[in-house]
């Protein structure tokens, strides 16, 4: 890590995110997009770039791309065009990538991020569609030191590229914005968020400038980042590197730099001198993409409530804290909580049961946890029994355990096992008197002011009554019998 003083400099960061769309087939042919097929088995003349093979646009890829763009509050253009991005690379057999350049699919959106949501905003410049290239395998083979292997299964996989404005001012903000973006894409069902398999990739443009100035400094592009942690580390490194260069009287060279996770530094991949001139021109084999207004409207209406909006709504509707809602979201128990809160009419109790015992059960069973086993209605039944003091909360826990085991309702279990609390004063009084008689030492201690022992006597009465006595009543009657 380069030691430096960041004081006096402001980082300026923009992101370019590539997200693989979850279509079953590729963007311009019918080949499968499934990850993990044997190399070069999901290929055809179109995605291998054979001369004369013609692309046909996958309608579903357009729907997914538009959905992502609309969720990012972009304007989806009724007409956009595909363009050829010309460059040579062994995993790009056509010698060009079909992408969008002028007239992209969607423009001018926003992404809110930050604690509590909505605290900060990064503008989205554009969302466009393109095809992925094949994959060059530089390692993993006995002769990898001499040869590069090529797998074209990925060639022609549909991608969207999401480009932000340079609105981000720290590595932490960049990571947080990317995290929010990933969350949205997953919630929409258009991307699986898998960064290790490369389904979601992030490049960042970084520059620094003296604080208080508005002119953009020379930027570098940091690539090869496949985790949030690396994004933050790579940007922190790059910001400090640029500040050190400027502090030392040097100039930043516009270049592409790669993040080396092992060395924990960025290194130069290519400088501006070798920068590609892609010679974009409109793709002659594809007509302009036209999306009718009503289709855009339909896609807009198909967008589910997004995680951040849901977090904020649930917090307000049920008086939960951000930490409480986050706990529900992390276990994907928000829908069950909401249904239980509505069915029971006791949001706080619903939260306590769902985030407590249900989450514990989920944690215990992991993959084997069946979210349908105990429904919101069944949980509401249990909550009603506890709220009415028919059973105590601790009996309630064992009842819930039985509900998971047997699928029976709380009412059934309580009736069949005789678990209803004993609210009969006469029965409790006789038990209280027996406990007092048998624990004279404890009684003496209480009379000498050691009131902590009182709880012990309550426990003894509860135990004597098989845990079924109404604890409030036990408390009252014990005090009465002890003249407290
Ligand atoms: Zn194909």
Image: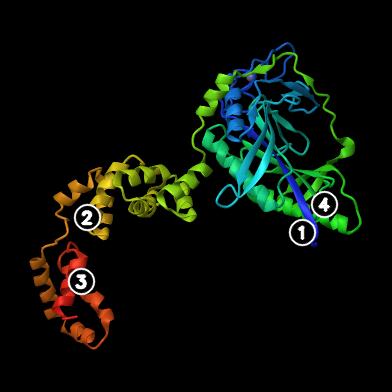
Residue of label 4: 213
Distance between the alpha carbons at the discs numbered 4 and 1: 27 Å
Q: Which is nearer the N-term, disc 3 or disc 1?
A: 1
Tell me if label 3 and label 1 are in contact, CB under 8 Å. Answer: no
Q: Give the image location of residue 56, x and y in percent.
A: 64, 15
Q: Pick whichever of labels 4 and 1 is earlier in the sequence.
A: 1
- Determine the image quadrant of residue 289: top right
Distance (Cα) linking label 3 and label 2: 18 Å
Question: Decide: marks 4, 3 in contact (CB < 8 A)?
Answer: no
Q: Is residue 37 visible?
A: no
Q: Is residue 299 left or right of residue 377?
A: right
Q: Residue 8, position in %: x, y? A: 80, 59
Which numbered mark, 4 or 1, is in the foreground of this view?
4
Residue occupied by mark 2: 388
Residue 475 is labelled as 3
Which structural element holds mark 2? Answer: loop
182 is higher (above) or lower (below) than 455? above
Between marks 3 and 1 in the image, the one whose residue lies nearer the viewer:
3
Could you say which is closer to the camera, residue 162 or residue 466? Answer: 162
Say which residue label 1 marks: 1
Helix, strand or loop at mark 4: loop
10 Å neighbourhood of mark 2: few (<14), some, or many (≥20)? few
């Amino acid at each position: 890590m380069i030691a430096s003083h960041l004081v006096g400099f402001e980082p300026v960061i923009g992101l370019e995110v590539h997200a693989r769309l979850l279509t079953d087939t590729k963007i311009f042919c019918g080949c499968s997009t499934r990850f993990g097929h044997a190399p070069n088995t999901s290929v055809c003349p179109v995605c291998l770039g054979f001369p004369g093979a013609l692309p046909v646009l996958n309608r579903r890829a357009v729907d997914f791309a538009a959905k992502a763009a609309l969720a990012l509050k972009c304007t989806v253009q009724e007409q956009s065009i595909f363009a050829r991005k010309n460059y040579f690379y062994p995993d790009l057999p056509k010698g060009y990538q079909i992408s969008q350049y002028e007239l992209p699919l969607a423009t001018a959106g926003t992404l809110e991020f930050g604690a509590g949501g909505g605290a900060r905003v990064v503008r989205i410049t554009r969302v466009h569609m393109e095809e992925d290239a094949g994959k060059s395998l530089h390692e993993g083979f006995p002769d990898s030191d001499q040869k590069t292997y090529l797998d074209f299964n990925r060639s022609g996989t549909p991608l969207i590229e999401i480009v932000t404005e340079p609105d981000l001012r720290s590595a932490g903000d960049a990571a947080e914005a990317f995290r929010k973006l990933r969350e949205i894409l997953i919630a929409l069902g258009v991307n699986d968020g898998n960064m290790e398999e490369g389904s979601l990739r992030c490049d960042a443009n970084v520059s620094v400038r003296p604080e208080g100035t508005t002119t953009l400094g020379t930027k570098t592009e940091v690539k090869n980042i496949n985790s949030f942690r690396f994004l933050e580390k790579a940007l922190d490194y790059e910001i400090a590197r640029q500040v050190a260069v400027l502090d030392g009287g040097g100039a930043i060279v516009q270049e592409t730099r790669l993040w080396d996770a092992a060395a924990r530094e960025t290194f130069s991949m290519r400088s501006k001198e070798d920068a590609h001139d892609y010679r974009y021109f409109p793709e002659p084999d594809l007509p302009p993409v036209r999306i009718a207004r009503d289709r855009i409207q339909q896609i807009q209406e198909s967008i589910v409530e997004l995680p951040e909006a849901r977090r904020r709504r649930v917090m307000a509707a049920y008086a939960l804290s951000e930490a409480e809602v986050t706990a529900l979201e992390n276990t994907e128990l928000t829908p069950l909580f909401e249904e239980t809160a509505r069915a029971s009419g006791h949001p706080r109790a619903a939260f306590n049961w769902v985030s407590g015992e249900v989450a514990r059960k989920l944690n215990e069973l992991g993959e084997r946890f069946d979210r349908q086993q105990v429904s919101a209605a069944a949980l509401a039944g249990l909550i009603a029994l506890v709220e009415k003091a028919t059973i105590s909360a601790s009996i309630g826990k064992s009842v819930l355990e039985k509900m998971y085991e047997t699928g029976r309702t709380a009412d059934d279990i309580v009736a069949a096992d005789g678990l209803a609390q004993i609210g009969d004063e006469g029965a409790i009084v006789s038990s209280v008197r027996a406990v007092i008689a048998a624990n004279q030492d404890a009684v003496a201690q209480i009379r000498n002011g050691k009131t902590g022992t009182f709880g012990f006597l309550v426990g003894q009465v509860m135990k004597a009554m098989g845990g079924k006595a109404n604890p409030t009543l036990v408390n009252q009657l014990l005090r009465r019998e002890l003249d407290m």
